[in-house]
Image: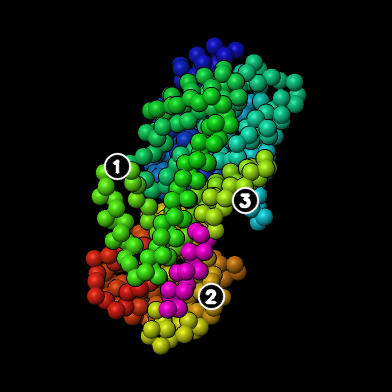
Amino acid sequence: MLKLLKEKILNIKARIGIIGLGYVGLPLALSFAKKGFRVYGIDIDKDRIKRLNSHKSYILDVSSADIKDAMAKKRFAVTADFGRIKECDAVIICVPTPLYKTKEPDVSYIVSAVNNIKKYMKRGQIIVLESTTYPGTTEEVMLPILESDGLKEGKDFYLAFSPERIDPGNEKYATKNTPKIIGGISRNSTDIAKTLYEQAIDTVIPVSSSKVAEMVKLLENTFRIVNIAMVNELMLMCDRLGIDVWEVIDAAKTKPYGFMPFYPGPGVGGHCIPVDPIYLSWKARMHGFEARFIDLASQVNSEMPHYVVDKVIEGLNDQRKPLRCSKVLVVGVAYKKDVKDLRESPSLEVIDLLMEKGAIVSYYDPYLPYLKIHDINLKGVPFNKDSFKDSDCVVIVTDHTNVDYKFIADNSDLVVDTRNVLKGITKRSNIVRL
């Protein structure tokens, strides 16, 4: 059975099902389709299915032309019908893994996907989870469900974990040229998953188990959240000491070894950095271990939107204006530059805090013309002189590269720059920096 599956993969005869057509699943599906595989994209979001069938992309890193080409060649089809799984030789799960309000992992999307797979699975399939989760999910949550009807992993089917490594908007690294980690429940599963991904990805790196593979992803993002928190705290310290933290970092990064620059900002966003370390911290507590570094880092970063609002208040006070009833224009609401992704964006909390304190808030973002905060619908203002002149304070929260920040500085009474985009503009009394 293992030999037959491997032959089908190597001969590009295997059919692949991708569950979840978001920023991970859709690029992955098209990567396999470009190599000649027949790929079924499965998603419960009917709007996504409709848009894809109309050859319209909703993902920054996927072109509508690529979707149209893959469908025209009959290599890519989309559906909400999980019954297509019985036609597949490989099934890859790319569903969301959010947190509950209690900061506990929500793996309900994974469980739902696995239950749907179980209904239609057949002998000889390889099933891979890509959704970021805590160590043990593949073995402790997925495996018992899939084996509950008598099939045995490593013999009747194969199960592995491969952490997604998608960086939206990254023009250098995409699905194909980003190394892929693979960890199976059994050796056979690792071997067949490696063979599968090698057909579409340049470098595939096997590890000893699914738990190791799950931990790899959490290490990557915990590394980032801890270092971002450290530099945010350093920024707070430099503010008290009257030192320019940006100059300190620029000088430190001239060291050719032993230092990697991280930069302060209004907080952390996206699905990965604010969420993944919490998964690890939660799992550690289940085993009687307190992840103090992670918890402290999360606490430091979560306070940054409050610090940004304090800077707005400070700047307005210097101009003898109260925050209440002042017009504040937030520039950039996406969680990172050059994307239209709002997930966990610190901008949303900055806007929320400003509104709570009575500010009249508007926003500009070239990627997001409309925004909803709680029950309030906002429409982005135009990028022109009147928008900035009419504002008491402009807060730069997301540093999109296609924005003329000098124009903003030249036409605003007060600018709070959280991203150092006005670095080259000095001796301006209307600029407040973190």
Q: Position of residue 297 (x, y in %)?
A: 51, 54
Q: Residue at x 66, y 17 (%)?
A: 156
Location of residue 409 with respect to 180 vertically, above or below: below
Q: Which residue position holds label 1?
A: 257
3D distance between C-alphas at marks 1 and 2: 45 Å
Mark 2 residue type: Met
On the rendered structure, is 121 left or right of 346? right
Q: Which residue position holds label 2?
A: 355
Mark 3 residue type: Leu
3D distance between C-alphas at marks 1 and 3: 37 Å
Instruction: Choose between 58 and 312: the one closer to the eye.
Output: 312
Task: Look at the image and say whether residue 301 sits in the magenta stretch.
Answer: yes
Task: Look at the image and say whether residue 366 sits in the magenta stretch.
Answer: no
Outermost residue, right side: 149
Of the two numbered discs 1 and 2 on the same chain, state the one appearing first in sequence.
Answer: 1
On the rendered structure, is 404 left or right of 48? left
Q: Which residue position holds label 3?
A: 99
Q: Find numbered disc 1 in the image and state the secondary structure of the residue it sits on.
A: loop
Region in magenta: 300-314
